[in-house]
Image (cartoon, rainbow, N blue to C red):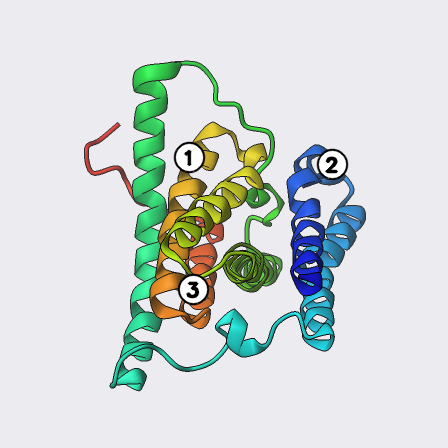
Amino acid sequence: MKNHRFLWGLFLLAISPQLFNGFYNPGLLAHPVAFWTVDILTLAAMPLLLYGWGLRRGLFTNQDLGLHFQLPGRRQKVIFLGAMIAMPFLVFYGFWFLMWLGHYLHYRFFAKGAEDFVFDFSMAVPKQGMEKIIVVFYFSITGGLAEEFYYRALPRLLFKSNTFSLVLYLLFSSLVFSLIHWEGGTIKMFVTFFLGLMLSGAYLMTRNLWPLIFGHFIANALLFSGVKLAAPWGN
């Protein structure tokens, strides 16, 4: 019970910067040193510190988090390799399908005007050169590692293993994943909720975090590099 309370505290502490960074990131963007200092502290250093602290406190093990190289089934190596190959496609194409659907629903049923957009991390990516490569890599690796740890692995430890609890886990983790993207507007929240459902579902099926981390990393790298897909039904 005590460890469970510590886990909840760890989880709430972990997500707090991402819940509130939409308030200060737009202002910090005009001050690059401040922006990158805060971002590195909250999205790179903080996840590493919380991960290390949780391990030392015995709140979880790497096995608990899914940081291992095992998958269900007899041909584990083949399944693991297949999951590592498939997940980038699922995340990237899943993201774009949901973006198309979100925009369609938004403009079809709600409003024709501007979206309720506040900030997007793509605004911090340089236009070209080595700086762009470094920033894209940084956003990709921190997104893959920190967000899968925060929004897939940690929430799973907060819920039991019965069917009702697993359904709650799927909904809770996806809702929180959506809420931390509030500054991107309602369409981004719609996208990240259903993308969160897909990723959390994959995590439950595989009990392994590495394919999700890799898929998230590759998808972020493509998205922050400016790779876009046209909607199949047109504008």
Residue 106 in sight: yes
Give the percent coordinates (x, y) of residue 215: 40, 63
Q: Which residue is mark 3?
A: 212
**Relative image position of residue 128 (x, y in whole percent):** 55, 53
Quadrant showing the N terminus = bottom right
Kind of residue sitting beneath label 2: Tyr
Tell me the CA gap for discs 3 and 2. 29 Å
**Cα distance, mark 2 to mark 1?**
22 Å
Sequence-earlier tag: 3 or 2: 2
Q: Nearer the viewer, residue 25 or 52?
A: 52
Disc 3 to disc 1, C-alpha distance: 20 Å
Q: Identify the image quadrant of residue 87.
A: bottom left
Residue 94 placement (x, y as % from top left): 32, 49
Q: Indicate the amino acid at tag 3.
A: Leu
| Label disc, if present, on residue 169 of the rendered structure | none
Identified by mark 1, the residue type is Phe
| Residue drawn 28% across the image and 40% down it | 230
Q: Residues within 10 Å of mark 1 (few under 14, many from 20)?
A: many
**What is the number of the mark on residue 24?**
2
Q: Quadrant of the C terminus?
A: top left
Give the residue number, with chain letter if any, for mark 1: 190
Q: Is residue 122 found left or right of 96 in the rendered image?
A: right
**x and y, in percent, of residue 154 in the image:** 57, 60
Q: Which is more toward the observer, 178 or 111?
A: 178
Q: Left or right: 129 with respect to 90? A: right
Q: Disc 2 on helix, strand or loop? A: helix
Q: Nearer the viewer, mark 2 or mark 1?
A: 1
Q: Kindly tell me whether residue 227 is visible in this rendering.
A: no
Circles 3 and 2 in contact, beta carbons < 8 Å: no
Residue drawn at the location 38% of the way across and 62% of the way down: 204
Circle 3 residues within 10 Å: few <14, some 14–19, many ≥20: many
149 relative to 28 in the view: left or right: left
